[in-house]
């Protein structure tokens, strides 16, 4: 039996304390109904999305390579025990930048043509990957790729719930965005509640809104623009800010948010994980770092709770930009690998695969650091 399945069995055996925040807690029900049956082989499709059009720092298109180089595929197959199908990187054209500007000149959305085209390609790829795999893992790339990954996912498996783990809620639209960068706007194209207010951008016409506000939840947000706050309040979008994590703890926050976005536990779960949700002290090589992020332990807790739902159907890991902090790019990619592997079933209690500097062979990033010295 694979480690993944052993893990799920262990979870299922655990006594889960009832949630304190509401009586109809469904955590335990989810555990017992959604986990794969013994003998099931969990198939994971991996897609690289070397896309950078959603923001201004081109190095983020090397994110998929950095994450693969940090050992993702081997960890998923050898340590988690999954059947891994790597489909390589999407072929994304890096052509001329064409912006979309409103007729009255009130807003500019940067690189809309390239971003719209690449996202359409990703949506088709995610849809196809989910025809033959249980879970699709998408390696970014900037966060604008959530448009393609979530839309493609919703086409393959409707009625999604979405967990958005990020320092930013990415709810801007072309008129509220301070920068015009699409990586701060993906949810503008995806939320059903905003359908009537959607800015018509022809490059994104193919994307129909597919997620309702009660079924999306934010965690770790701490840098929010005024226009985004207005939308969150207007539609009462479930969220746990860093302040709420400080006050109530990560366990309470995860239980609350998962019960809110997927109350009966029967919706497929899409997780869109921006590495900038994690504190820049441990994951610094990213485009828009914000101090005071998730600790390593909190990030692992979030992802292990994702695995425990048994509902995970697609996972994005975005915004690793190895060019921004070359000395610590490898360490950032290693955190990304830990995030993905734990969301897919590895536990922080499975310490066999961990190699500490003081116990035998030095940790890889440690040794390369020493070589530089
Ligand atoms: Mn983001």
Image: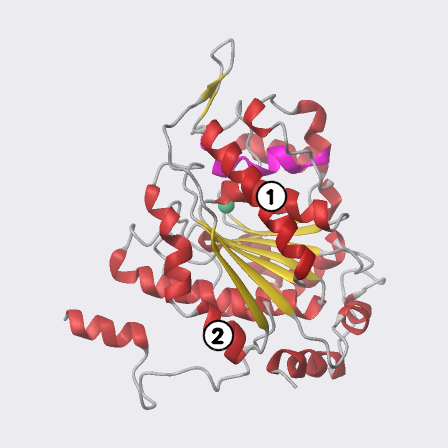
| Residue 240 seen anywhere in this rendered image of the structure | no
Q: Is residue 182 magenta?
A: yes
For the residue labelled by badge 2, is the local secondary structure a helix, a strand or a loop?
A: helix
Read off the magenta span.
181-192
Relative to residue 236, is residue 56 drawn left or right? left
Residue 228 on image: x %, y %: 57, 34
Q: Is residue 55 found inside the magenta-colored segment of the image?
A: no
Residue 267 lies, with reference to residue 331, above or below; the image says above
Residue tagged 1: 123
Instruction: Name the colour scheme.
Output: secondary structure
Q: Residues within 10 Å of mark 2 (few under 14, many from 20)?
A: some
Helix, strand or loop at mark 1: helix
Q: Is mark 2 within 8 Å of ligand 1?
A: no
Numbered disc in front, either 1 or 2: 1
Please rate how many residues cluster around mark 1, counting C-alpha atoms within 10 Å: few if below 14, some from 14 to 19, many from 20.
many
Decide if ligand 1 comes within 8 Å of the CB at mark 1. Answer: no
Left or right: residue 1 versus residue 365 is right
Q: Which mark is residue 353?
A: none
Compare residues 40 and 59 and report the one nearer the observer. 40
| Residue at x 31%, y 75% (from the top left corner) | 364
Q: Position of residue 308 (x, y in %)?
A: 68, 70
Magenta stretch: helix, strand or loop mostly: helix
In the picture shown, does residue 347 fall above or below 210? Answer: below
From the image, which quarter does the N terminus lie in? bottom right
Quadrant where the C terminus sits is bottom left
* Residue 75 numbered tag: 2
Q: Tell me how far mark 1 sits from mark 2, CA to CA.
A: 26 Å
Q: Residue furthest left?
A: 373
Identity of the residue furthest to the right in this view: 24
Question: Residue shown at 77%/48% (left/top)?
Answer: 159
Q: Residue furthest bottom?
A: 360
């Amino acid at each position: 039996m694979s480690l993944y399945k052993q893990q799920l069995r262990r979870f299922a055996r655990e006594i889960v304390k009832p949630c304190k925040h509401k009586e109809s807690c469904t955590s335990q029900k989810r555990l017992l109904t959604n986990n794969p049956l013994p003998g099931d082989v969990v198939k994971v499709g991996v897609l690289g999305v070397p896309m950078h059009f959603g923001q201004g720092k081109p190095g983020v298109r090397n994110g998929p390579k950095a994450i693969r180089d940090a050992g993702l595929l081997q960890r998923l197959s050898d340590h988690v025990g999954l059947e891994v199908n790597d489909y390589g990187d999407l072929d994304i054209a890096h052509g001329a930048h064409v912006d979309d500007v409103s007729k009255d000149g009130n807003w500019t959305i940067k690189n809309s043509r390239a971003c719209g085209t690449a996202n359409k390609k990703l949506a088709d790829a995610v849809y196809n990957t989910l025809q033959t795999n249980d879970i699709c893992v998408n390696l970014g790339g900037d966060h604008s790729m959530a448009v393609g990954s979530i839309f493609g996912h919703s086409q393959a498996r409707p009625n999604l719930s979405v967990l958005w783990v990020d320092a930013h809620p990415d709810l801007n639209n072309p008129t509220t965005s301070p920068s015009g960068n699409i990586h701060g706007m993906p949810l503008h194209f995806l939320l059903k509640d905003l359908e009537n207010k959607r800015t018509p951008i022809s490059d994104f016409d193919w994307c129909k809104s597919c997620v309702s506000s009660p079924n999306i939840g934010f965690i770790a947000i701490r840098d929010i623009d005024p226009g985004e706050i207005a939308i969150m309040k207007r539609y009462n979008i479930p969220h746990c800010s860093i302040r709420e994590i400080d006050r109530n703890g990560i366990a309470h926050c995860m239980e609350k948010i998962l019960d809110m976005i997927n109350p009966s536990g029967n919706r497929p779960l899409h997780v869109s994980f921006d590495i900038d949700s994690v504190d820049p002290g441990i994951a610094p090589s990213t485009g828009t770092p914000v101090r005071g992020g998730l600790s390593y332990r909190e990030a692992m807790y979030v992802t292990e709770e994702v695995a425990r739902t048994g509902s995970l159907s697609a996972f994005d890991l975005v915004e690793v930009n190895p060019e921004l902090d070359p000395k610590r790019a490898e360490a950032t990619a290693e955190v990304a690998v830990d995030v993905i592997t734990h969301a897919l079933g590895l536990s922080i209690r499975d310490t066999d695969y961990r190699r500490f500097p003081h116990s035998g062979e030095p940790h890889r990033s440690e040794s390369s650091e020493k070589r530089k010295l």
